[in-house]
Amino acid sequence: MSKYLYAAVVLACAWTAIPVTPAAAAIEYPWCAQYSGRGGGGRNCGFSTYSQCMGTVSGIGGFCERNQFYQGRPKRR
């Protein structure tokens, strides 16, 4: 491998390791859907309202519950 090709590969690898944007904080929502099913089900805590959650589990099985990790909206400064 020529030294120029080697340098290009090293530079490309280093460039892809640099994050372009800062990592965003996880967004927590107040309601979680707990799905049931033969495959083991799943959990989705991405609902702002109880109605949104119930609309999602309606017909596919499951239930809704409050997200234990939700701490409310962040306070504005």
Image: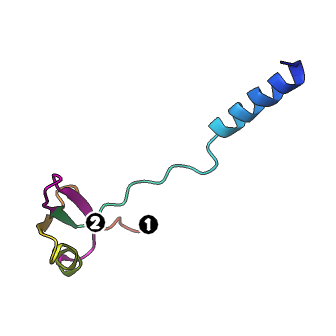
Instruction: Tell me, for residue 47, which label it has, or none.
Output: none
Q: Secondary structure at mark 2?
A: loop
Vertical relation: 57 (above or below) 40: below
Between the residue at mark 2 and the residue at mark 1, the CA separation in whole angstroms equals 21 Å
Q: Amino acid at mark 1?
A: Arg
Q: Is residue 24 above or below residue 32?
A: above
Q: Residues within 10 Å of mark 2 (few under 14, many from 20)?
A: many
Quarter of the image for the C terminus: give it.
bottom left
Q: Residue furthest front?
A: 38
Judge by depth and name the residue closer to the eye, 67 or 2: 2
Which residue lies under the disc numbered 2?
A: 29
Residue 49 lies within the magenta run: yes
Dot 2 amino acid type: Tyr
| The N terminus lies in quadrant | top right
Find residue 37 and report its horizontal and vertical position in percent.
14, 59
Q: Is residue 71 visible?
A: no
Query: Depth check: 30 or 34 in front?
Result: 34
Q: Nearer the viewer, residue 19 or 8?
A: 8
Instruction: Name the residue carrying label 1.
Output: 77
Residue 6 appearing in the image: yes
Residue 7 quadrant: top right
Q: Are marks 2 and 1 in contact (CB under 8 Å)?
A: no
Mark 1 nearby-residue class (10 Å; few <14, some 14–19, many ≥20): few
**Which of the 4 image quarters holds residue 73?**
bottom left
- Locate residue 48 relative to residue 34 in the image: left or right: right
Camera-side residue of 62 and 24 = 62
- Is disc 1 placed on a helix, strand or loop? loop
On whether residue 45 falls in the magenta region, the answer is yes
Q: Residue at x 69, y 32 (%)?
A: 13
Q: Examine the rendered structure and indicate whether residue 41 appears above or below residue 19.
A: below
Q: Which residues are magenta?
A: 35-50
Residue 18, position as x, y percentages in the image: 65, 39
